[in-house]
Image (spheres, helix red, strand yellow):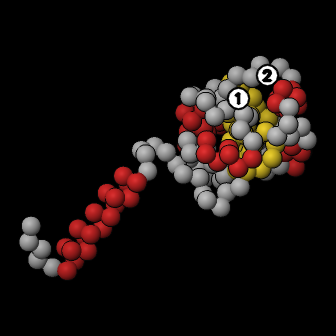
């Protein structure tokens, strides 16, 4: 193909670069920021987050093998984007400790904080909710007033509206 102007060369080069960039990552996967660190989540973390943590915030409790967790997180992320409120969007990895959790976080596009359980998992889970039977995704939405809403699976539209309203 014969290019008529330098501008056409630049456009062609940009299109080629976009194609290479898009093919470098698997479709639909987000690579967590290399500067992101994993925050320890133990038996003392949850009460502290409820008392003084970011507001509003969403916590998705997940495992490295949870096949439905990314879809639940996507629902939360889309609601946050539509609201323009910039809530903290946290994934809490229950079965992988420390920095190894980063390898399992690529499905959580928009995540602002990554936690990883450290300690006896059933005890940590009991602190979060004594009734929780270890089913994932387990989602807790904390509104601007610090009120939590809990659900297994993606939150409903009504839950998302209550989570992101001002009062």
Res. 6 visible in picture: yes
Q: Is residue 29 left or right of residue 83?
A: left
Q: Secondary structure at mark 1?
A: strand
Q: Nearer the viewer, residue 63 or 48?
A: 63
Between 101 and 1, the one nearer to me in the picture: 101
Say which label, 2 or 1, has the lower sequence index.
2
Q: Is residue 71 left or right of residue 141?
A: left
The percent position of residue 27, horizontal first and vertical second, equals 42, 44
Q: In front: 53, or 14?
A: 14
Q: Which residue is mark 1?
A: 138
Location of residue 77 in the rendering, given as x and y in whole percent from the top left corner: 59, 43
Residue 163 located left or right of residue 67: right
- Which of the labelled discs sits on residue 44, or is there none? none
Name the spot of residue 99 as percent of width and height, x first: 70, 49
User: Residue sitting at 21 percent across and 74 percent down?
Assistant: 9
Q: Is residue 9 above or below residue 71?
A: below
Q: Label 1 crowding class (10 Å Cα cut-off): few <14, some 14-19, many 20+?
A: many
Q: Is residue 15 above or below residue 76?
A: below
Residue drawn at x 86%, y 23% is 130
Disc 2 and disc 1 in contact, CB within 8 angstroms: yes
In front: 139, or 64? 64
């Amino acid at each position: 193909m014969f290019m008529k102007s330098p501008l056409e060369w630049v456009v062609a080069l940009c299109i080629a670069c976009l194609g290479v960039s898009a093919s470098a990552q698997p479709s639909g996967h987000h690579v967590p920021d290399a500067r992101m660190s994993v925050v320890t989540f133990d038996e003392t973390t949850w009460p502290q987050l409820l008392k003084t943590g970011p507001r509003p915030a969403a916590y998705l409790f997940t495992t490295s093998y949870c096949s439905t967790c990314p879809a639940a997180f996507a629902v939360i992320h889309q609601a946050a984007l539509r609201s323009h409120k910039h809530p903290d969007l946290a994934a809490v990895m229950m079965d992988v400790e420390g920095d190894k959790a980063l390898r399992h976080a690529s499905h959580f596009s928009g995540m602002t904080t990554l936690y990883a359980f450290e300690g006896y998992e059933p005890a940590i889970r009991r602190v979060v909710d004594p009734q929780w039977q270890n089913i994932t995704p387990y989602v807790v939405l904390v509104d601007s007033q610090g009120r939590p809403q809990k659900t297994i699976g993606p939150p409903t539209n009504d839950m998302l509206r209550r989570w992101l309203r001002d009062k």
